[in-house]
Image (cartoon, rainbow, N blue to C red):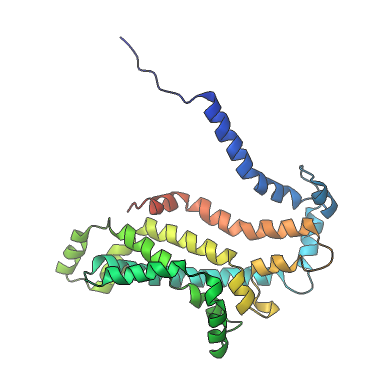
């Protein structure tokens, strides 16, 4: 009786994968190691952990212009609000584009997709003048409003909604459930992987956003983490150990979010539904 043997990849393919993984991990490793070393050691390219992390943390907590904890709180607050509002608005739009039939909706969707080709730099000055006239500078809503509705997220929800079973909606309508109830009690639970993937993408974009907060958040008390990190390099001499520690702290929330929601993120990206 013959036994089937599994086809194994050649050894050089595994070697190639290992090399690529090491190259991908190296910048993160260098950032963590540099956070524990002196600035001179970082410049010299020291690749082993040091014992200077406490001193770097003390220097980071005593920065004269911007507070680390204040910047962390500003980033968490504004990014969380942006994520919730953006997911709600864009999911409603994507749900409506796919579920409700209309002859002109495809034309409107195409116009929305064309807006993705317009660079933010071309709308930056009009947005600033508009928000300045509305007295929304240095406010949370000033940070959030330009990103509440994005063509990418609307398209993302619309495409994933194509796999949503319409028979479920029809059955819910027969049972007397309202359209709002169908969205919150039927659509959202079934499409939870899509919501998780969209939330991760939106949170990461908002957390790492630099240009718009630099324009709209003009006071030190409203600075976010990307602006805080940039402020550390504004002097004549840069403490690279302290800078790397700040970057490491800034990276932690996105790492925690991604690894805790990794499975749902993959399911959402591939268009799966619960």
The quadrant holding residue 151 is bottom left
Expressed as whole percent of the image width and height from the top left, the position of residue 254 reads: 56, 58
Q: Quadrant of residue 225?
A: bottom right
Q: Is residue 23 visible?
A: yes
Outermost residue on the left side: it is 174
- Identify which residue is drawn at 78% across, 55% down: 241
Q: Position of residue 58 (x, y in %)?
A: 79, 62
Q: Front-most of 273 and 236?
A: 236
Q: Is residue 243 above or below residue 119?
A: above
Residue 111 as seen in the image, left or right of residue 252: left
Vertical comparison of 219 with 11: above or below = below
Q: Is residue 135 above or below residue 122?
A: below
Q: Is residue 213 left or right of residue 96?
A: right
Q: Residue at x 52, y 29 (%)?
A: 13
Q: Please say whether residue 92 is visible from this viewpoint.
A: no
**Which one is nearer the viewer's eye here, 57 or 24?**
24
**For the N terminus, which image quadrant?**
top left
Q: Is residue 140 left or right of residue 161?
A: right
Q: Is residue 218 above or below residue 33?
A: below
Q: Residue at x 62, y 77 (%)?
A: 215
Q: Residue at x 27, y 71 (%)?
A: 105
Q: How far from the left and from the top, in percent, is residue 272?
A: 34, 51
Residue 217, percent across and down? 63, 78
Please tell me how many numbered marks the rendered image carries: 0
């Amino acid at each position: 009786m013959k036994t089937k043997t599994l086809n194994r990849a050649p050894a050089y393919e595994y070697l190639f994968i290992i090399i690529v993984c090491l190259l991908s991990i190296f910048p993160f490793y260098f950032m963590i190691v540099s956070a524990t070393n002196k600035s001179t050691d970082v410049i010299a390219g020291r690749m082993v952990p040091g014992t200077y992390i406490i001193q770097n943390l003390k220097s980071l907590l005593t920065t004269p212009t911007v507070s680390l904890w204040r910047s962390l709180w500003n980033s968490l607050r504004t990014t969380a609000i942006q994520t919730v509002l953006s997911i709600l608005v864009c999911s409603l739009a994507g749900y409506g584009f796919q579920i409700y039939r209309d002859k002109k909706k495809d034309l409107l969707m195409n116009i929305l997709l064309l807006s993705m080709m317009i660079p933010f730099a071309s709308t930056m000055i009009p947005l600033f003048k508009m928000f300045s006239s509305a007295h929304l500078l240095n406010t949370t809503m000033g940070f959030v409003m330009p990103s509440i509705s994005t063509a990418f997220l609307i398209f993302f929800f619309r495409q994933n909604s194509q796999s949503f079973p319409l028979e479920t909606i029809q059955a819910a309508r027969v049972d007397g459930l309202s359209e709002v109830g169908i969205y919150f009690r039927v659509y959202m639970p079934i499409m939870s992987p899509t919501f998780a993937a969209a939330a991760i993408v939106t949170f990461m974009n908002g957390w790492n956003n630099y240009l718009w907060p630099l324009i709209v958040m003009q006071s030190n008390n409203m600075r976010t983490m990307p602006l805080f990190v940039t402020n550390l390099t504004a002097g004549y001499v840069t403490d690279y150990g302290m800078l790397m520690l700040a970057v490491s702290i800034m990276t932690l929330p996105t790492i925690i979010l991604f690894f805790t929601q990794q499975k749902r993120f993959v399911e959402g990206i591939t268009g799966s539904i619960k």
